[in-house]
Amino acid sequence: MRDRLVVLYRGNRPPATARIESLADTVYATEEELPYLLPGADVLLAWVTITPAIREAWPDDPLKAPRWVHASSAGVDSFLFPALVDEPRVVLTNARGVYEQPTAEYVLGLILALAKDFPGTWEHQRRREWRPRPSDGITGRTVLVWGTGPIGRAIARLLRAVGMRVSGAGRTSRTGDPDFGTVHGATTLRSALTDADYVVLAAPLTEDTRGMVDAPVLAAMKPGARLINVGRGGLVDEEALVDHLAAGRLAGAALDVFAREPLPAESPLWNMPGVMISPHTAGETTSEREALVEVFLDNFTRHLEGRPLRNVVDKRRGYVVDDTHPA
């Protein structure tokens, strides 16, 4: 008997639908349709991941809930609600392996754009103004990557390759890390913030990390430093960030994620000097959709063959645990 697979989508269905449908009895559900189609499903492929629809549609009867949920994203904070987390028969996997390098490239691009003031150059071009001016270099500049998972590691490797001095911030302090060198825990984080020219947020959003970049953390950052967030908007106290930017304590920020998405038109972040805003696209590429499907198809084949699934999320921690690289 074939599994019943529900694919949650918005707008466009995933590519390779024929391959997906060859593996299971497949139905497609919008967010509005999900409450009617999810009960009794064996597998949920969440092609849409930043949505309350899964929580709201989750069956009250655990026996009617899917046994496996696959998130087509690296972050899984939308899935960490009690009914899913507390049910041991439900396995949660994610799209680890798709977003690491694209996000690292994006972060390098953001650092270059901030250091070289590309937004200012483009504005002068728009006005047809010839305005020669010096810019910052990035070689030898210090970067603290807050989040030592696969995306943070890819960022660290790329920034080291262009001559930046990189360290990490994670759950436990350590030295000799292959990608970060030094990883700062709670006891050494403040000194690392004081030294960093750039602080890059690449941590998952969990109960432990929500609001971690608050007013005291922003106050501890080096005057003139820049903040880059490619993790989740909920990592940052946005009101405190606005205050520190307005006061000139920080030189700028590049923000790809926000507490509310889309970012409301009335947010002061839109018009603040030195702030770059992008619409949660740091990891997106033209080949992203195909890569996401390949991860799911590989895992579904493993599921059918009774082999261990890839990218199994520790639902208590909120991310895939990598024993070879501690968090």
Image (tube, rainbow, N blue to C red):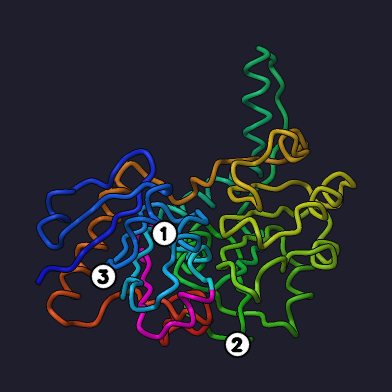
Please name the amino acid that badge 3 sits on: Asp
Q: Quadrant of the N terminus?
A: bottom left
Q: Which mark is residue 73?
A: 1
Q: Nearer the viewer, residue 20 or 209?
A: 20
Q: Residue at x 29, y 75 (%)?
A: 310
Looking at the image, is mark 3 or mark 1 earlier in the sequence? 3
Please name the amino acid that badge 1 sits on: Ser
Residue 75 spot, x, y in % from top left: 48, 63
Asked if residue 236 lies left or right of residue 34, the reply is: right
Residue 129 spot, x, y in % from top left: 69, 14
Q: Which residue is mark 3?
A: 42
Q: Nearer the viewer, residue 81 or 144?
A: 81
SS label for mark 3: loop
Q: Which residue is mark 2?
A: 174
Q: Nearer the viewer, residue 88 or 271?
A: 88
Are dots 2 and 3 in contact, CB under 8 Å?
A: no
Please name the amino acid that badge 2 sits on: Arg
Question: Is residue 281 inside the magenta stretch?
Answer: no
- Above or below, 127 against 73 in this view is above
Separation of disc 3 and disc 1 at Cα? 20 Å
Image-quadrant location for residue 84? bottom left
Looking at the image, is mark 1 or mark 2 earlier in the sequence? 1
Residue 217 spot, x, y in % from top left: 80, 67
The mark total stands at 3
Q: Which mark is residue 114?
A: none
SS label for mark 1: loop
